Amino acid sequence: MAESKKNDIVHSPLVTYASMISLLTLCPPFVILLWYTMTVADGSVLNVFYYFRNNGYQAFVDLWPKPTLLACEIIAVYGVFEAVLQLLLPGKTVYGPISPTGNRPVYKANGVAAYLVTLVTYVALWWFGIFNPTIVYDHLGEIYSTLIFGSLIFCIFLYIKGHLAPSSSDSGSSGNIIIDFYWGMELYPRIGKYFDIKVFTNCRFGMMSWAVLALTYCIKQYEENGKVADSMLVNTTLMLVYVTKFFWWEAGYWNTMDIAHDRAGFYICWGCLVWVPSVYTSPGMYLVNHPVNLGTQLALFILVSGILCIYINYDCDRQRQEFRRTNGKGLVWGRAPSKIEASYTTTSGETKKSLLLTSGWWGLARHFHYVPEILAAFFWTVPALFSHFLPYFYVVFLTILLFDRAKRDDDRCRSKYGKYWKLYCDRVPYRIIPGIY
């Protein structure tokens, strides 16, 4: 079991340690600095620099908001609400991919229903004067601070659970406490038989919070100014279209690297619980206090371009999912697909077969779907225009993340498929950008 865990580690121990230390020491304060810069320092990195230069280390102590009872209550109500929806809403049974040890996880696909119930409930609470979403924005720093510490405690729980009560044989230790905590112990941790922890952290808490906060920023600007700028409308619309696409395709997401390969540790769970609600939503956070009037033509151009990118990203995933569903017998762009029949061996010694699609979007590059995803992020950020760099941090971060993920996925597939992966790379030579990389 320990050996299979070691094979999951794509990066060298040195890179893993550096990533772990960076994530632990730099990401939590960065989340707070990002919030402070966007909401207090006029979005200006220079303003924050001068503030630190004039006040020294004490400046950071002073600006870091303390976790509060209100923040705990907001997070708890939201988390419990999403957990209840995940457990109780009806949905068809969906099977995930076969794991390295031969297990096949079973899910209940009710993400669209949970998404619609969440947004309708949130807007209704505001519309009928029961709860004002501006409270979330006004206490955002306290909420992020609480999430930072609370998610760390949750990741410690996952580490202990992985040692004492793993949910399946897809678990194990590398023998190194740092790697185990960072990358995770379990591939499919569950509480009881039905509550999947990664579905909750990645989808129902992290991605759902993206949509909830996008609406929050829009409502805050409306209540502050009596109207919503076209820049905020474009930003909010594109983010909601993207998250809607995600939940529409959620069952497909359960076949991706995040769920089917990356274990439930600090890397993925802390990221979904803290990084997604803060960094992924940051362009909208900036626009609350920096409304930009784009004009009808520019606003429509950005909106249509962003929707097109989101559609292409969706169609890439849909094409591969349909290819797998039909066992390679469906049409791809109106013709029979080009494919490679690859075999691999599980850790239990059983031989399995997979089909690798080499035509359609997947004939352009092995991870071409990352191109429209990065462009979509650019289009929902560009309504902020270019007065400050910080709103574009998410685009830069996403580019680095996806390029690294593409490399890790390639390395994993090379190890899994061997000669078949070499043949696949010969047919599809570019990793992400056709003709370039």
Image (cartoon, rainbow, N blue to C red):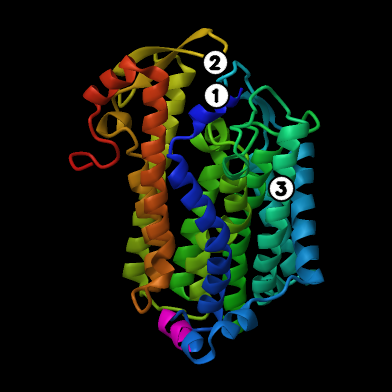
- Whether 273 is drawn above or below 231: the answer is above
Query: Which element is circle 2 on?
Result: loop
How crowded pointer 3 is (Cα within 10 Å; few <14, some 14-19, many 20+) is rated as some
Give how far apart the Cα atoms at labels 3 and 2 are. Answer: 28 Å
The answer to if 384 sits in the magenta stretch is: no
Left or right of 55: which side holds 353?
A: left
- Whether 1 is drawn above or below 11: the answer is above
Splitting the image into 4 quarters, where does residue 407 fall? Answer: top left
The residue indicated by pointer 3 is 156
Q: Which residues are magenta?
A: 45-50
Left or right of 358: which side holds 208?
A: right
State yes or no: discs 1 and 2 in contact (Cβ < 8 Å): yes
The residue located at (33%, 75%) in the rendering is 386
User: Residue 347, which numbered label?
Assistant: 2
User: Of the residues shown, which amino acid type is indicated by label 1?
Assistant: Ser
Residue 6, percent from left and from top: 52, 30
Could you tell me if residue 190 is visible in this image?
Answer: no
User: Of the residues shown, which amino acid type is indicated by label 3?
Assistant: Ile
The residue indicated by pointer 1 is 4
In the image as oriented, which residue stretches furthest toward the left?
Answer: 435
The residue located at (38%, 52%) in the rendering is 400
Left or right of 282: which side holds 94?
A: right
Residue 195, percent from left and from top: 75, 35
Q: What secondary structure is the magenta-colored segment mainly?
A: helix
Q: Nearer the viewer, residue 394 or 283?
A: 394
* Image quarter (top left, top right, bottom left or bottom right) of the C terminus: top left
The residue located at (30%, 40%) in the rendering is 432
